[in-house]
Image: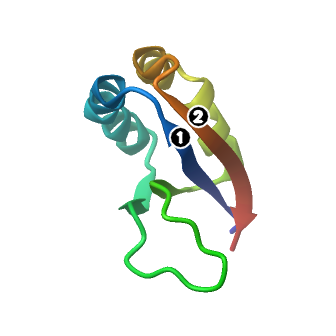
Amino acid sequence: MVKGLIVITYKEIKDDEKLAAYVAIAPATVEKYGGKFLCRGYPAILKENGQNERTTVALFDSLEVALKWYEGPEYKEALATLDDGAVRDFKFYETS
């Protein structure tokens, strides 16, 4: 079965308080939709052109579930809390 994977990299953190408020809310929304975190935080080791960026990777049962989570009211509330507190790359992947 093909799973859904999200990868979020933080290019710039503009407001640590907004990020902290977001982090207090967002993980529970992922778990509510059956998502599992594979990693959260900063890399332990950098190689080649690796960037020291805060990164979150989570796995969902499917891409559809990941999109349902992202578009759901719970995560929208978390995003509103983050507001303009960070500049991020947010990517969705399919994986087996």
Query: Mark 1 belongs to which amino acid?
Result: Glu
Residue found 37% across the figure and 77% down from its top: 44
Where in the figure is residue 14, as x and y percent of width and height?
45, 29
How many marks are shown on the rendered structure? 2
Judging by the rendered image, the residue that carries numbered circle 2 is 87
In the image: residue 55, left or right of residue 40? right
- Badges 2 and 1: C-beta atoms under 8 Å apart? yes
> On the image, which quarter does residue 51 sit in?
bottom right
Judging by the rendered image, the residue that carries numbered circle 1 is 12
Residue found 70% across the figure and 50% down from its top: 92
Query: Mark 2 belongs to which amino acid?
Result: Val
User: Which residue is outermost to the bottom?
Assistant: 47
Where in the figure is residue 34, as x and y percent of width and height?
43, 48
In the image: residue 96, left or right of residue 32? right
For numbered disc 2, what is the local secondary structure?
A: strand
Residue found 60% across the figure and 52% down from its top: 6
Q: Label 2, label 1: how many angstroms apart (C-alpha)?
A: 5 Å
Q: Earlier in the sequence, mark 2 or mark 1?
A: 1
Vertical comparison of 54 with 16: above or below:
below
> On the image, which quarter does residue 45 sit in?
bottom left
The quadrant of the picture occupied by the N terminus is: bottom right
